[in-house]
Amino acid sequence: MATLLSMQDYESPINVTKDTLSGPDRKPRSLKELDVRQAVVEELVLKLLYLVGSISMLELSDSVKLSYEVTDDIFCRLRAQSLCQVTGMSGNIPHIGITAQGRTRAIELMQQSQYTGVAPVALSSYQDQTRKQSVQHVEVHVEEVERAFSHLVIDPDLLRQFGTALNSGSAIFLYGAAGTGKTTVAEVLSRVLAVDSVWIPHAVEIDGQIITVFDPAIHHAIEMPKPAAHDERWVKCHRPAVLVGGELTAEMLDMQYNPTSKFYISPVQMKANNGVLIIDDFGRQRLRPDELLNRWIVPLDRRIDFLTLIGGKKLEIPFEMLVVFASNNDPSSLVDPAFLRRIQTKIKLGTITEEQFAEIFRRVARDKNVTYDDGIPEDLIRFIRATLNEELRCCHPRDIVNQVCWQARYEQKTAHMDQLSLQRAVQAYFPMIS
């Protein structure tokens, strides 16, 4: 399963507008202004009535996220076919319910698809809006990257590479030895883009088939003023970020059809559209690198993906995201030159200097409320370099401080690092130390 990347709350989102009547910034006021066939909405409303029984027109409008005018038009059409009726009034707001004839029709519809959520948008509307919100349109500047990475100790040259890569809107390959901070860097890169806002549809419709897109675990909604003037079938969100690791399979990259509910759940790359998709520990997936190469060589180049529905119908879906590959291996050892060419930026995260190590140690200890004797960071540096004959990595200070915290918790003491606790920490953390 894809992993949600935690996002902070951001100010100053970018407003995205659309000129067409069915755009996210304008709520449709009539059936003619909808971008989907009216039969799609009629069937959705009828199934909802079948499930909930009597419901007020306002509640129905809120459930399907359509204007009162559109919902009333749908009700009038269903009532003319003797599929629903007025069951009562609250002031001048009617309560409506399904008829016996409507119930029979709803059962037939439920056998075809059990989707009863927010009214979908047309695939063409999704395609247009996603391309308008492409990460390639984002401009990232020095101060924004420096602010996002301010809690980390990073070389200015690396920050420049990160900023340049973000402005490319293309794929990035982060590589280096284990413990050099690749996953952390990838997550922070996604936070830089998350300051923007994009429109995400609840669901997309194509030829009567429903594909759900909005996922509250991934898409962080931005509070909108009420009453809403925008098309509420779309949700204004921060640019999403999705992380997948060793669990990635070929099936996760295609439409997920539920044979019971009979509608589709969008794949991870569709959920990550207009945001960031991080492929962590690339090369360790159940999906082999060459399989991913064959699957994504066209999307990475042309920014178009092709997904397949049951029955073989192909859908053209925009591939408008920043893909970040993070791996312990050299890029050339994992993929062939044709695929590597499509990953425009390759950034190596290497070892750190003694000064950087000491600063990271100081910050981690401060954040963990761990005090330490003078000379402890220098002793740890000498141990790693002289005794272990290893390079310094940014994970070492954090992991050693964590060991001291766990010792203190067990002994019910205040966390303090002296020579004895340092010795115990390195014995527990580094292999073959006795």
Image (spheres, rainbow, N blue to C red):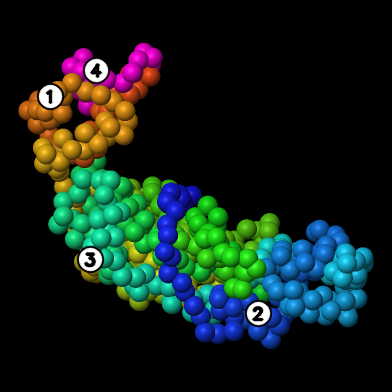
The residue singled out by tag 1 in the image is: 375
Calculate the distance from the C-alpha at mark 3 to the C-alpha at mark 1: 38 Å
Q: Classify residue 157 as left or right of residue 9.
A: left
Q: Position of residue 233 (x, y in %)?
A: 62, 69
Q: Is residue 48 above or below residue 368?
A: below
Residue at the farthest left position: 386
Q: Position of residue 305 (x, y in %)?
A: 43, 72
Q: Please state which of residues 278 and 96 is positioned toward the viewer in this rendering.
A: 96
Q: Within the image, what quadrant is residue 325 found in?
A: bottom left
Calculate the distance from the C-alpha at mark 2 to the C-alpha at mark 4: 66 Å
Amino acid type shown at disc 4 = Ser
Amino acid type shown at disc 1 = Gly
Q: Classify residue 14 as left or right of residue 370.
A: right
The residue singled out by tag 2 in the image is: 28
Q: Quadrant of the C terminus?
A: top left
Secondary structure found at label 2 = loop
The residue singled out by tag 3 in the image is: 164
Q: Within the image, what quadrant is residue 389 found in?
A: top left
